[in-house]
Amino acid sequence: MSVRISEVLVDLLAIALVGLAIKFMDDCLDQELDSAAGARNWACWLGRGLVPYAMLCLGLAAGMRPALSVPLFLAAYALGMVNAPLTLNPSGFLAAWESLTVLLLGLVLFGWRAILWASCLILAIQMGDDFLDSRSSEPAEYKAQRGCSESGPVGASLPSRGTSRWPSLDQVERALIFLILLLVSLRLHFLPSLYALLAAAFIMFLTSRLP
């Protein structure tokens, strides 16, 4: 019994750590826009240590549960560029090609099931965030700016602060897509999907408590 509990705690901690790594990288990309809008951002608290802490969280998560944490990070990286596939990244490649390359590497390293699970879960979290933030009072200009900034790597991963990534969808469509993606995630990996939802909620809570 104690062995099973310890395994659950390690799974939960690994997923929470990779979630923090994704969130830290997201906030690193968005810190100027968040600062201008007065939005909470981990960069304001961790400063120049934000990227090293993100790397630390990712390294610890990968060491604990590589089969769970690395696919989640790869999926967040690839899906973070889905809104601007023709953007030229610093690597010199189009965002679409870079996303495809990352997903293919994930398929080779972890198999289709892990990558499909991670991609559906990340998209479900995004869609759920859009559903909750649909009545946000954030200025439209700032939303548009964040939409551009979040088209970079890891930029559309964990819940943000009022950004609608799919403004053409209504509430019913968002809810249906969220449920479908969540059900697929649960079907592929039931407990890890629940752990990821708990981790996302926990990270949202921690972000809300930032000064």
Image: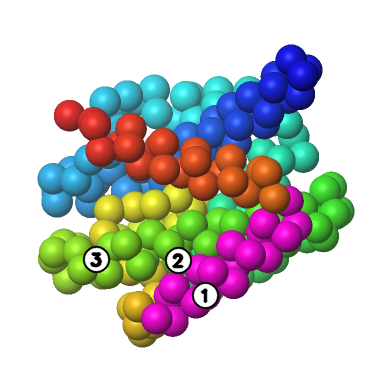
Disc sitting over residue 143 in the figure = 3
Q: Is residue 176 rendered magenta in the image?
A: yes
Q: Residue at x 70, y 19 (%)?
A: 6
Distance between mark 1 and mark 2 Cα atoms: 7 Å
Q: Disc 2 on helix, strand or loop?
A: helix
Whichever of labels 2 and 3 marks the residue nearer the N terminus, that label is: 2
Task: Give the residue at mark 1.
Answer: 177
Q: Disc 3 on helix, strand or loop?
A: helix
Give the amino acid type for the residue marked by disc 3 in the picture: Lys
Q: Residue at x 59, y 46 (%)?
A: 194
Q: Residue at x 48, y 24 (%)?
A: 52
Task: Specify few, some or many for label 1: CA neighbours under 10 Å numbering under 14, 14-19, or 20 or more.
Answer: some
> From this viewpoint, is residue 98 visible?
no
Give the amino acid type for the residue marked by disc 2 in the picture: Met
> What range is drawn magenta here?
172-189
Task: Give the residue at mark 2.
Answer: 127
Please state which of the two labelled residues, at mark 2 or mark 3, is closer to the viewer.
2
